[in-house]
Amino acid sequence: MQPVIITDKLTKHFGDFIAANELTFEVDRGEIFGFLGANGAGKTTAMRMLCGLLTPSSGKATVAGFDVYKETEKIKRKIGYMSQKFSLYDDLTVSENIRFYSGIYGMNYEQIKKKTAELLDELQLQNEAKNLVRELPLGWKQKLAFSVSIAHGPDIVFLDEPTGGVDPVTRRQFWDLIYHAADKGVTIFVTTHYMDEAEYCNRVSIMVDGVIAALDSPSNLKKQYDTDNMEDVFYELARKAKRKAD
Amino acid sequence: MKILLFLLEKEFRQILRNKQMIPLLLIAPVIQLVLLPLAANYTIKNISIAVVDNDHSTFSRKLISKITASGYFRLTGYTASYNEALSIVEQNKADLALQIPINFERNLVRENSAKVFIAINAIEGTKANLGGAYLSSIISDFNSDIRINWPAAPAASDPPQITVVSSYWYNPFMNYNLYIVPAILVTLVTAMAAMQSAFNIVQEKENGTIEQINVTPIKKHIFILGKLIPFMVLGIILFTLGLFIAWLFYGIVPAGSLLTLYGSLIIYLFAMLGFGLLISTYSSTQQQAMSLSFFFILIFNMLSGVFNSVDSMPQWAQTIVQTFPTSHFIKIMRMVVLKGSGFSDILYEIGAMFVIGLILNTWAVLNYRKTTG
Amino acid sequence: MKQLIVFIKKEFLQVFRDKRSLLLLFGLPIAQIVLFGFALSNEVKNSKIVVVDYSKDAVTSQIIRKIAASKYFNIEQSMQSADQLQAAFKKGAIKMAVIFPANFAPNLQHTGKASMQVIADASDPNVATTVVNYVTQIVNSYNGQLSSLSAQPLQIVPEVQMMYNPELLGAPNFIPGVMALVLMLVCTMMTSVAIVKEKELGTMEILLVSPFKPLYIIIAKLTPNLLISIINYFIIIILSAVFLDLQVKGNLLLLTLCSILFILTSLSIGLLISIGAKTQQAAMMGSLMGMMLPTMLLTGFLFPVENMPIALQWFANFVPSRWYFIIVKQVMLKGLGIASVWKETLILLGMCVLLFTISLKKFKIRLQ
């Protein structure tokens, strides 16, 4: 089957600064693909190019079969997105947020009602349905944001550092949601700097100074660097990094 | 299309939930509309004058009482010397000083001519103009009175006199409220429309929700419509409130058709909201949006003819002012509300606002990038 | 103390990095001075009028010529009949119509009297009164000409002196007002929004947790805006002198000190607004909607305060710009000294101290 994401020497520079340098990789359908790297390594830039938010400087890429230069609007119909700031409306309730984001992807009222009930059930947020998102604890916000991002049934969902600032238990729960979605066939493209989350992915790539320094399954990488955890792998690669975090 | 409905639903929910904004958007303007027209008053009364009568003659006393009886002037100083009178002007206690010199009556009768000295505080521009004009006309009236009653004047040929009969249309009682209430209403609607739309989008930029929108297949123009329409509605509500207040407190009823008025309002809002939109595409923080919009709003409010007279400005300024939507709308307001002008009378103004609005909105849409770089 | 300096430095950096806000901070006064100084005028000039002459004789032509020659009027077109008048007024094409009835000159000769009609569009009563006055003056002087042919006795000759502004320039009327308006509004808005921004971002909490005294926080927040406003004040003074021929006639130091006092007062108002406002938006709208119109209308530069109803005059006394406006006029335009403005200065001082104290108290309460 065709990979859902194909990139070939994808590059982005801002003036003299090369944020992403000739990235070449593929992501298969249903994969959980982790995009690791230190802050400033270029992860977010890469993701934004794939989402159609940023035009690449050179190189090629297709997402869900569509070209990232010319067919960004078509890409957007097939993807979901969760940004670092979670992007839920603080001053709308849980149901209202679900309703809005489902509606703008073209779901009709029937479907929205069904979807809302489903989500509330899955997340156990039935009692909070009418509460403003502002009042939710951080962990719940994140889970809600994730669910909302896949509510319209996209092929791929892009998650930009989705688990910042929550306790390990909540993070674990969040990853349960991700597994659940992956089981249903959604491809997950997630950036993170939590190395333990790398273990949850099918494959990970590690970016250093804008370049992909390693790309393989976690177990292979650990073998390759002769260590039993991803942190060490990362440390090995990252300490050669010249770029400091922003 | 349905997507637009979802957008609108979200916008209205957010606006209605914003507890601090509703009073600011609706109540503060209402209060200002009620109270401030009371402030705006150019009626020519109570111009303070300091008088020096060095003559103490019948004529001088008659002239002075004619001045004080006119109702336009208030005697705030009656001094023994001109210098004292001038210092009263200096202290801001009088706008004019009049000196009737010694031997005034005698010179008038014997030499057929006598001077009086008037000093006007020309810093108070309007009062200077009007005060000076009225004083001159009172003196001139007084002059004619003397001549008519003077027995020794050559009665044979009364000089031919042309009199000017004036009538004031559209505002026969010279009610200044009719001028100022539309002006204040326009100011309020302008400020709200431009700043709100700019702010709203920049807020979404600042808290990241705009990125979420950019990642969806929502078309640019739908998104922008989704932002314009709620504020258009707010603007119309504010305007309607304003008209209601104008009727309730000032008895102002639009002489022209409401349809024309609201039609013009919608086009004006179209232009001003587009302007706010444009500003938002150039701002990344709310402070920037505020800075930019305030800069322009103050200029619009001061120069468009809302509180000043455009015709009196130099040509280059008048040309610049033509590019402001506000200049056209204030004209429409006054024409339709006070004179009952119809749609065909305001064709030029409507056209101008529409074109400006088109330019601003197109510029904004083009500038708005879902994909950067 | 050193900490305070560090804090102030940070504030400055934040302010100066924001290019667009700088546009407002410096560009606004400059643009306003230029525009208002050159463009605004209290004179009513170039009013478009229409003349309908049913008589078309020597007298009417003379009068019409005089009117046309006046800078106050632009004769749009000589209409044939008065039916089109309504339409012309409704179109906003003309401000006034002058109508000479038939047989004007013959009437004047035979009966010694003739009257002409003047119709003014009173939707702007001020302009209407003024243009009617102008026309009346022109006709009066024509009358004077006629009567001088028959040697008028008993002529009172007024000699008029325009004080402080002999050429009747527009600038002296507007610049003091613009100064008051711009300084007040910019200070209030910029300060209130800047402080609320920190509240929104959450960085305010960090400050409050630090050993910084609330007073120091306030001082640090106000200082950049204070300095910028002082610079603005000087820019306005310099621009007025250079471009508008408007120098400071009185003591520059006195004016500057009073201006600083006024700026401090406005900053305090901004501070007060920022304490109440929950979002930047609310702060801005509060400053704008709550301050702009009252400042514009009650300061006294668009409309004289003495003509307002007593209640509003009383209310106007609470608007700081009203007092500052008087000070500027007295010192800058009339060249007077502290003796004539001590009252206003004291009032400003009182307002400043009061506002600042209230803000400081409220600020402290918020922290608890």
Image (cartoon, rainbow, N blue to C red):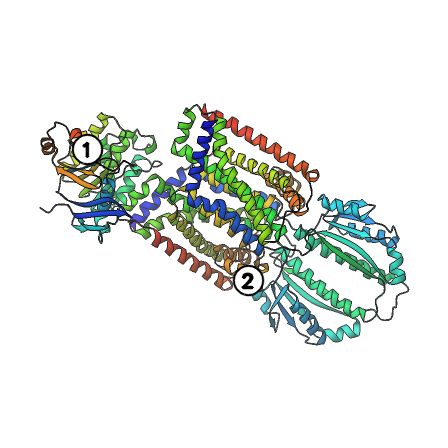
Report how far apart the C-alphas of labels 1 and 2 lie in the structure.
68 Å
* Subunit bearing disc 1: A
Q: Residues within 10 Å of mark 2 (few under 14, many from 20)?
A: few
B221 vs B259, left or right, is left
Residue at figure coordinates x 87%, y 50% from the top left: B56
**Residue kind at label 2, given as amino acid type:** Gln
Which residue was labeled with disc 1? A177
Counting from the top left corner in percent of width and height, residue A159 is at: 23, 38
**Residue kind at label 1, given as amino acid type:** Leu
Counting from the top left corner in percent of width and height, residue B131 is at: 71, 53
Q: Nearer the viewer, residue B2 or C145?
A: C145
Which residue was labeled with disc 2? B315
B4 vs C259, left or right, is left
Residue A100 appears in the picture as rendered: yes
Q: Residues within 10 Å of mark 1 (few under 14, many from 20)?
A: some
Q: Secondary structure at mark 2?
A: helix
Q: Nearer the viewer, residue C60 or B253?
A: C60
B182 lies above or below A156: below
